[in-house]
């Protein structure tokens, strides 16, 4: 297995592992595509997050689309066909049924893995996600599974939340149509329709988006818990972006502030669960982060003369 990306989500870690054989510079492309955009009026309410522009589209207009099947026989046939066409398939696992996940046997959420065939009756499963999560540590993993093990790994979710659905919908960087959660799910490479203008009202730009999120969550511990995973994902991707161009004090300071934000969020959630929400800790972390981002952007403007 190649060295896993240092700071990515389960979606982008899987996406990089899937694309890298065909797009050797995909890590650099993804780092350049990292951003933060927040939609203020998604259909299910609350906020929706986009963490990067799409990097899966090729020069022929092909990209990834969700597919699904209600029964295992149909899913197995479709996975076989996709691997026969392209050599690999990006599948949607269920953390409750992934033995190497810290959520195994407990919390369930979508989790992307890369599948390749190994002989007639085995599948090579690759999971490059490597992170300390609220449920524990997950390290990159690669092994062989038979069809029964693969079926268990891809067990459909029994329940989900509006925010988790939003994360699935925007996992490629923009909203795409989802496959039904009642069945097995994967992504196929195929022709994609022309990209329409994004629906709804989006706040673009790192500083405006950060300020919106801070205004939403700092005084509301329920909102803080609801968007904790989105804040954590933003931190991972922004640190990944900064690591791709190290060397300045401003970048180092910003990376440290991004790393501190999820820690403050977890502390805030824990304090609220104990009945004494420490809003000041969360607000201070956001203020320190926005200050470092402002300084870094000013530094970059001076360097470019803009």
Image (cartoon, rainbow, N blue to C red):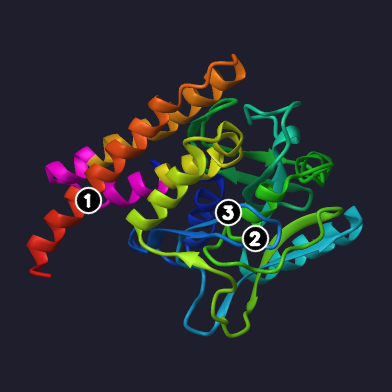
Q: How far apart are labels 1 and 2 at the CA level? A: 30 Å
The reply to whether the C-beta atoms of the residues labelled 1 and 2 are less than 8 Å apart is no
The quadrant of the image that shows the C terminus is bottom left
Q: Nearer the viewer, residue 112 or 88?
A: 112
Left or right placement of residue 255 versus residue 73 in this view = left
Q: Residue at x 65, y 77 (%)?
A: 190
- Counting every numbered tag in the picture gives 3
Residue at mark 2 to residue at mark 3: CA–CA distance: 13 Å
Is the residue 39 above or below the residue 265 in the image? below
Q: Residue at x 73, y 36 (%)?
A: 108
Q: Position of residue 198 (x, y in %)?
A: 55, 74
The part of the image, by quadrant, that contains residue 224 is top right
Q: Is residue 3 visible?
A: no
Is 297 included in the stretch rendered in magenta?
Answer: no
Q: Is residue 250 magenta?
A: yes
Kindly identify which numbered label has been placed on residue 294. Answer: 1
**Depth-wise, is mark 1 or mark 2 nearer the camera?**
1
The stretch of residues the image draws in magenta is 237-253
Q: Residue at x 48, y 39 (%)?
A: 232
Q: Which mark is residue 169?
A: 2
Q: Secondary structure at mark 2?
A: helix
């Amino acid at each position: 297995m190649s060295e896993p990306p240092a700071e990515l989500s389960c979606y982008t870690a899987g996406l990089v592992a899937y694309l890298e054989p065909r797009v050797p510079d995909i890590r650099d492309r993804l780092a350049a595509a990292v951003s933060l955009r927040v939609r203020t009026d998604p259909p299910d309410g609350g906020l929706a997050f986009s963490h990067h522009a799409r990097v899966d589209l090729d020069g022929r207009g092909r990209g990834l689309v969700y597919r699904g099947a209600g029964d295992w026989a149909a899913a197995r046939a479709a996975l076989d066909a996709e691997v026969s066409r392209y050599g690999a398939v990006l599948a949607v696992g269920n953390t409750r049924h992934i033995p190497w996940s810290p959520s195994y046997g407990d919390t369930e959420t979508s989790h992307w893995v890369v599948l390749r065939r190994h002989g007639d009756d085995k599948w090579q499963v690759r999971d490059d996600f490597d992170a300390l999560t609220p449920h524990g540590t997950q390290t990159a993993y690669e092994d062989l599974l038979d069809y029964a093990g693969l079926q268990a790994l891809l067990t459909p979710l029994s329940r989900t939340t509006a925010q988790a659905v939003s994360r699935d919908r925007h996992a490629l960087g923009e909203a795409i149509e989802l496959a039904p959660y009642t069945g097995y799910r994967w992504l196929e490479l195929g022709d994609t329709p022309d990209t329409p203008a994004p629906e709804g009202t989006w706040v673009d730009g790192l500083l405006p988006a950060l300020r919106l999120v801070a205004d939403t969550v700092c005084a509301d511990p329920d909102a803080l818990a609801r968007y904790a995973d989105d804040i954590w994902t933003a931190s991972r991707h922004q640190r990944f972006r900064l690591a791709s161009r190290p060397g300045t004090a401003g970048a180092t300071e910003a990376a440290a502030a991004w790393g501190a934000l999820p820690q403050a969020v977890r502390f805030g959630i824990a304090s609220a669960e104990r009945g004494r929400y420490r809003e000041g800790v969360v607000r201070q972390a956001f203020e320190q982060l926005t200050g470092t981002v402002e300084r870094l952007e000013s530094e970059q403007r001076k360097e470019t003369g803009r």
